[in-house]
Image: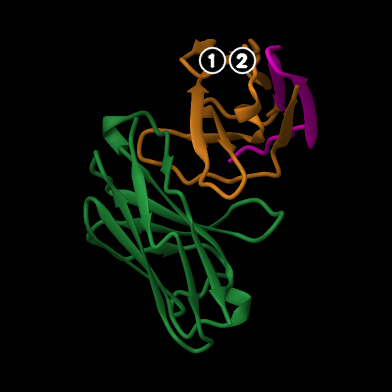
Chain colours: A orange, B green
Amino acid sequence: DAKTTQPPSMDCAEGRAANLPCNHSTISGNEYVYWYRQIHSQGPQYIIHGLKNNETNEMASLIITEDRKSSTLILPHATLRDTAVYYCIVADTGTASKLTFGTGTRLQVTL
Amino acid sequence: GAVVSQHPSWVICKSGTSVKIECRSLDFQATTMFWYRQFPKQSLMLMATSNEGSKATYEQGVEKDKFLINHASLTLSTLTVTSAHPEDSSFYICSASPGQQGTGEQYFGPGTRLTVT
């Protein structure tokens, strides 16, 4: 699986958009970009994933660059409950590929 | 969304005893489940891939005779930590994927905190 690089930490004011970057310059053509988050002492939560097109769901938006070497997860209106570690992972899809978790980005949402 | 449960949520056991942790997919069938371990202030480390009806696949460095995995049905996988020692104290998390019913995303259980005394 391709390796990802994320900033170790970010801060965001409540109500503002949180933009979390991820570099995955070695991504291969059959690999998707997945985003998960882990709130303290809980299991990770699936957020969103995409291949090459931008994606949006009720939780977030995912913007993938045209060359697919980087992506940005956008939480449009961050709340205190969005404080968590966010993991960007690239992996094959289809038959439940195993996920390799990096160190992620610790997002702190503040008042 | 898909729900995965784990039981127990926490357990304390004495050194040398065995502990079984259950992972259930509540509203979907999962031919594949995954077991992870997470030590304090560290990321999740994949331990093994559990396949329904067949032997689990263990990651390098994970002792298969110590961490027994059974995936007897499409909704249940169990992890048994045998002869537990204090260094096995950790947060154990399972995940499951709807597989062909979905597009590769995995859903995680809430985790089981194991403390070996």
Q: Is residue A30 visible?
A: no
User: What is the chain letter for disc 1?
Assistant: A
The residue identified by callout 2 is A64
Say if mark 1 contacts mark 2, CB within 8 Å.
Answer: yes
Name the image quarter holding the N terminus of chain A.
Answer: top right
Q: Residue at x 55, y 17 (%)?
A: A60
- Side of A68 where B59 appears, left or right: left
Which of the 4 quarters of the picture holds residue B1? top left
Q: Which residues are magenta?
A: A1-22
Residue type at numbered disc 2: Ile
Q: Residue at x 69, y 54 (%)?
A: B42
For the residues labelled 1 and 2, the Cα–Cα distance comes to: 6 Å
Which of the 4 quarters of the picture holds residue A22? top right
> Which numbered disc flags the more N-terminal residue, 1 or 2?
1
Q: Is residue A89 visible?
A: yes
- A33 vs A40, nearest the viewer: A40
Whether A19 is among the magenta residues is yes
The residue identified by callout 1 is A52
